[in-house]
Image (cartoon, rainbow, N blue to C red):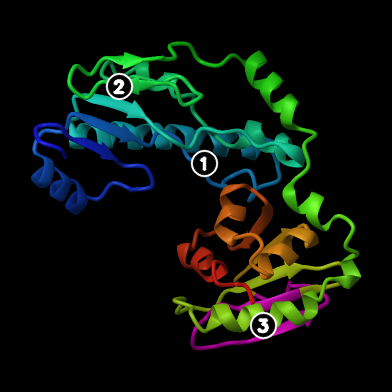
Amino acid sequence: CHGDHSVVNMNDNPQQAQQVAAILDFCGTIDIALLPFTGAGPYPQTYVSQESELKRLAEVKKLEFLDRYRSLADALAPKLRIPFAGQYVLGGKLAELNPFRGLADAVEITEFDQNAVVLADGGNGSVDTVTFEPTCVRKERYSEAQMRARIHSIAELPMDYELWFDALPTDAMPLRRLLPKAYRNAQARSSCAYDWHLCFELEEGWFACNVHSGNPSCAFVENPEAFYPRSELRVDLRYLFGLLTCVFHWNNAEVGSQYQTRRFPDEFRRELQGFLNFFHV
């Protein structure tokens, strides 16, 4: 807030009644709100392999985030709404995942919200906070041809880890020394009060570790099937090396769809990602 003007950025802020009440109490009437409208995370494209199920779950996700937008817009009642963040495409060898990410085009918001405006991509769009007049707006959805062309233009680009570690032989990566050390570091900070094994696929066998803060255990095993509940993680070993050594970060890896996960049972546990964020040496 500045004087009589107020702009609220709700990106990465899931709606909570207490939070909304505090914002309204602080700002009074909200002039402009930057509102999330689509989910940029790894689900379902890195959690499911069957194409028909991927398409179904992607549509469910898309509609769920549009409903979240409606709910937050109604709760905050800003004079102007800007659909914000989360809209990007995957390149390199991940390009094939794009059709299954369940992303909305920001222009879809304007089709049911007359108070919404979509600023053009490229960083040149702006909104006058006094008159609410925007510049450089986009009024048409990106066509399928435009999306295909964009994805095609980046589909052959290598990932950073492919450039940096391509010449490093897998057997030269000390993964069997790094993994137990990374586990001890994460386990010391674990907020998980239940048994759940994270199982990392290696060239030969797996590394399995329990996230339970009160029941630590880890081992190299031939297969992970004896562990339940569990998550099986398949990460390019070059990328895994970078994650374990803090060249890369697990949160970026998750949002960037850089690894595949299969859950048994198929349940969402937020604490598991928190555990992984400390899984490094």
Q: Residue at x 88, y 71 (%)?
A: 172
Does 116 appear above or below 181? above
CA gap, disc 2 and disc 1: 24 Å
CA gap, disc 2 and disc 3: 50 Å
Relative image position of residue 137 (x, y in whole percent): 40, 15
Disc 1 marks which residue? 40
Does 207 appear above or below 231? below
Check disc 3 and give the amino acid type: Lys
CA gap, disc 3 and disc 1: 31 Å
Check disc 2 and give the amino acid type: Val
Q: Quadrant of residue 107?
A: top left
238 vs 171, left or right, is left
Secondary element type, mark 1 = loop
| Stretch of the chain drawn in magenta | 207-227
Disc 3 marks which residue? 181
Residue 224 covered by magenta stretch: yes
Relative image position of residue 243 (x, y in whole percent): 67, 64
Few, some or many residues within 10 Å of mark 1 (<14, 14–19, 20+): some
Relative image position of residue 8 (x, y in whole percent): 25, 38
Disc 2 marks which residue? 127
